Amino acid sequence: MGLVFLIKFDQTPNNCFYLCRCCQAPIASSQHYHFGFSEEGLSGSIFSSLANVHTLGPEHDREVGDYKVTNVYCNQCCNVLGVKIIEVPDEELNLCEADFLLKMPKLLMWNGHEIVDAYEVAYEENY
Ligand SMILES: [Zn+2]
């Protein structure tokens, strides 16, 4: 796949962001994290914007319940991090088309001081 140029995020105390657990490529700013979601076989954390990821073509879209989604891959290690939402049912208010639904166990988090487990951070925030 040739050289991969990664967008870098600053590891400074006033910056929080998520990284790929496998290769530590920066994936998402905490500013783009919305909330956790779980419904009809889809579960994860909703993000409105990601960096250093890619999806495959429309032929790889698949249906999960009433949703149409496609896998989101890390640009550096090509692991699946979650899905991008392609189509949502009319009555769905929480998820929007083009949102991303990521699996927290696939991510780490820079919390402003150190890299920690993203899943535990999300858990503490929700409870
Ligand atoms: Zn990766």
Image (cartoon, grey):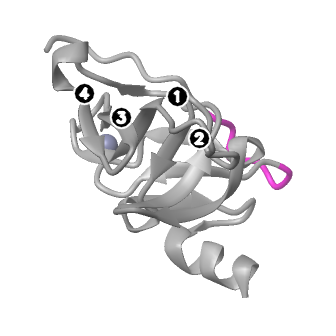
Circle 1 Cα neighbour tier, 10 Å, few/some/many (<14 / 14–19 / ≥20)? some
Which residue is at the far front? 91
Separation of disc 1 and disc 4 at Cα?
Answer: 20 Å
Q: Residue type at mark 4: give it.
A: Asp
23 left or right, relative to 9 = left
Tag in front: 1 or 4: 4
For the residues marked 3 and 4, what is the alpha-carbon distance in whole angstroms?
7 Å
The quadrant of the rendered image in which ligand 1 is seen is: top left
Mark 3 vs 4: CB contact within 8 A:
yes
Task: Return the residue at label 4.
Answer: 61
Q: Which residue is mark 3?
A: 68
Q: What residue is disc 2 on?
A: 28
Q: Amino acid at mark 3?
A: Lys
Which amino acid type is marked by label 1? Ala
Per the image, label 3 sits on a secondary structure element best described as strand
Question: Which residue is more in the foreground, 25 or 81?
Answer: 81
Identify the secondary structure beneath mark 1.
loop
Is residue 60 visible to us here? yes
Q: Nearer the viewer, mark 2 or mark 3?
A: 3
The residue that label 1 is drawn on is: 51
Residue 51 position within the rendered picture, expressed as x and y whole percent measured from the top left: 52, 28
Spatial distance from mark 3 to mark 1, Cα to Cα? 21 Å
Residue type, mark 2 in image: Ala
Residue 28 location in percent, x, y? Answer: 59, 41
Mark 2: secondary structure: strand
Give the CA separation, mark 2 to mark 3: 22 Å
Question: In the rendered image, which quarter contains the N terminus?
Answer: top left
Residue at 72% over, 65% down: 113
Specify start and end residues of the magenta stretch as a single range: 9-14
Dot 1 or dot 4, earlier in sequence: 1
